[in-house]
């Protein structure tokens, strides 16, 4: 068992949480579930698996996680950032074990990995990279960027190692929930676009390039047309169509509908000058 504390943020995650907790059992020496007001069995499930269950009002995903870092009395060498709809595979745990034995003098202070996304039970193999995340970091050297969306873990020192094994991201429970989640994400992205620019955080070069491409190229394209271009690029040129109907559903909703929603909300903000709605936790219940 690794000298590691897993932190999981929840709200009404009774469907996802059991599999998440099973995936870290025997790997994390401590599990802390930080809840933002569940009305289902999330708390009971957490306690059943031996996890600590604490409540904290939601401000943003980043602030919720950073609050846990500051208030959960973490004394382990490592911290794991994992969402309730994510799973650590046996391959991930096996590849991480020797890395977590390295001393601080090695300079390895973080472990990154990529995700396998699932849609209607099918893993998506095409359509471009789905997600890369710095999941594990040494206690005291990692914080989450304070931004509404696309918030990454930033190391104050040391370097991260990218492992080959991938974790599972079972991203949604139904098409209905996926649509609600994308609408929630769209509001968060509008807040990021209309908010102040990012500071000088120590980010991985790949992340900096992606953000520069997004702000310097994507958002210079005409509204609404750019959503269609992203869909064609992901679904056709990056072969998303090879994942069959689940691939079509995913890319139409995520690459087109989501990006179209962001543009519609940006257009609304420009026309009405209405203040952005405050962030609230996504209700994962159905």
Image: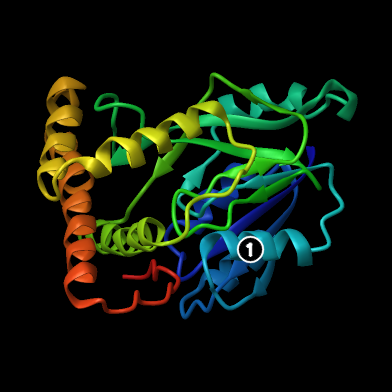
Q: Is residue 41 above or below residue 85?
A: below
Question: Residue 48: x percent and y percent?
Answer: 64, 65
What colour scheme does the image use? rainbow
Identify the residue shown where x is 58% and y is 78%: 57
- Image quadrant where residue 91 sits: top right
In the drawing, does residue 79 fall left or right of residue 116?
right
Identify the residue shown where x is 35% and y is 77%: 277
Toward the viewer: 72 or 271? 271
Identify the residue shown where x is 50% and y is 55%: 84
Question: Residue 117: x percent and y percent?
Answer: 35, 37
Toward the viewer: 220 or 120? 220
Residue 219 in view here: yes
Q: Is residue 188 above or below residue 273?
A: above
In the drawing, does residue 270 fall left or right of residue 142?
left
In the drawing, does residue 105 fall left or right of residue 274?
right
Question: Residue 213: x percent and y percent?
Answer: 35, 33
Mark 1 lies on residue? 33
Q: Is residue 234 above or below residue 48?
A: above
How many numbered marks have been drawn onto this rendered protein structure?
Answer: 1
Residue 175 in view here: no
Question: Residue 243: x percent and y percent?
Answer: 19, 28
In the drawing, does residue 228 fall left or right of residue 107?
left
* Quarter occupied by the N terminus: top right
């Amino acid at each position: 068992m690794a000298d590691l504390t897993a932190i999981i943020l929840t709200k009404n995650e009774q469907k996802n949480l059991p599999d998440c907790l099973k995936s870290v059992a025997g790997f994390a020496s401590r599990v802390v579930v930080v809840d933002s007001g569940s009305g289902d069995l999330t708390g009971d499930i957490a306690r059943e698996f031996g996890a600590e269950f604490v409540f904290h009002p939601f401000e943003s995903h980043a602030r919720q996680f950073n609050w846990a870092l500051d208030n959960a009395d973490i004394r382990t060498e490592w911290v794991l950032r994992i969402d309730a709809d994510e799973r650590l595979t046996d391959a991930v745990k096996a590849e991480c074990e020797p890395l977590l034995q390295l001393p601080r003098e090695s300079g390895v202070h973080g472990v990154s990995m990529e995700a396998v996304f699932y849609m209607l039970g099918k893993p998506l193999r095409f359509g471009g990279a789905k997600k890369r995340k710095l999941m594990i970091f040494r206690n005291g050297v990692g914080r989450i960027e304070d931004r509404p969306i696309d918030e990454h873990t930033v190391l104050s020192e040391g370097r991260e190692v990218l492992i080959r094994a991938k974790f599972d991201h079972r991203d949604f429970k139904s098409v209905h929930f996926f649509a609600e989640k994308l609408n929630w994400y769209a509001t968060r992205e509008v807040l990021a676009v209309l908010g102040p620019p990012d500071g000088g955080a120590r980010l991985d070069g790949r992340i900096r390039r992606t953000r520069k491409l997004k702000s310097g190229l994507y958002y210079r394209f005409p509204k609404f047309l750019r959503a269609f271009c992203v869909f064609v690029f992901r679904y056709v040129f990056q072969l998303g169509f090879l994942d069959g109907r689940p691939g079509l559903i995913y890319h139409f909703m995520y690459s087109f509908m989501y990006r179209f929603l962001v543009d519609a909300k940006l257009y609304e903000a420009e026309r009405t000058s209405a203040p952005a709605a405050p962030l609230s936790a996504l209700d994962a219940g159905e």
